Amino acid sequence: MTYVFELLNKSHDRKQFDCGKPELDRYIRTQVNQDIRVNATTAFMMVSPDSPRVLGFYTLSASAIMLGDVPEAIAKKIARYPAIPATLIGRLARDVSLKGQKVGPSILIDALLRSYQTSLEAVGAQAVVVDAKDEQAKHFYEQFGFTAFPSVPMKLFITMREIKDALTSAGILP
């Protein structure tokens, strides 16, 4: 099946969304509009082209990483500012109806591609950051090259250079 990613709008049906994590279900159904209204996040919905029902989503926000929090081997490869500009994937989820269909990676790839493109065209960023909600989520992100912060193991990041290399290898970027 083909899915599209769109900025959240009034046509999206979020009422039935169920990812199996009550805090994420509640967020997308009731809180996300408040965060958008105060410019705390943007939200992208994954839908079928023929249905407004939300089947997955992610949010993006501006963030920063303190240089001292990054492993030295990686710090050598990025600009050495006290605070490194980053994009935060605040929340990412897919509906339980799609379990086993490998759409989680598609949602993450769209978030990474959008973050990379935005870093080139609109707001500079050197990395993408995520806060894994549990060990399963941490493992998911690690499979895509994210590295845990040594001092906060459930917080992970990936550099824009690594994103570019991965998207190029996958044929998504030229």
Image (cartoon, rainbow, N blue to C red):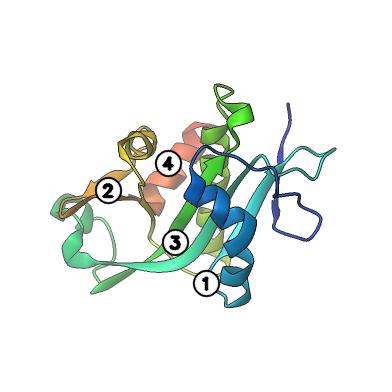
Q: Residues within 10 Å of mark 1 (few under 14, many from 20)?
A: some
Secondary structure, mark 2, is strand
Residue 129 location, x and y as percent? 37, 55
Q: CA distance from mark 4 to mark 2?
A: 24 Å
Q: Which residue is mark 4?
A: 165
Amino acid carrying label 2: it is: Met
Quadrant the N terminus occupies = top right
Q: CA distance from mark 2 to mark 3?
A: 17 Å
Residue 94 location, x and y as percent? 57, 38
> Between 2 and 54, which is closer to the camera in this rendering?
54
Amino acid carrying label 3: it is: Thr
Quadrant the C terminus occupies = top right
Q: Which residue is mark 2?
A: 154
Q: Which residue is mark 1?
A: 40
**Would you say 56 lies left or right of 143 here?**
right
Secondary structure, mark 4, is helix
> Between 113 and 26, which is closer to the camera in this rendering?
26
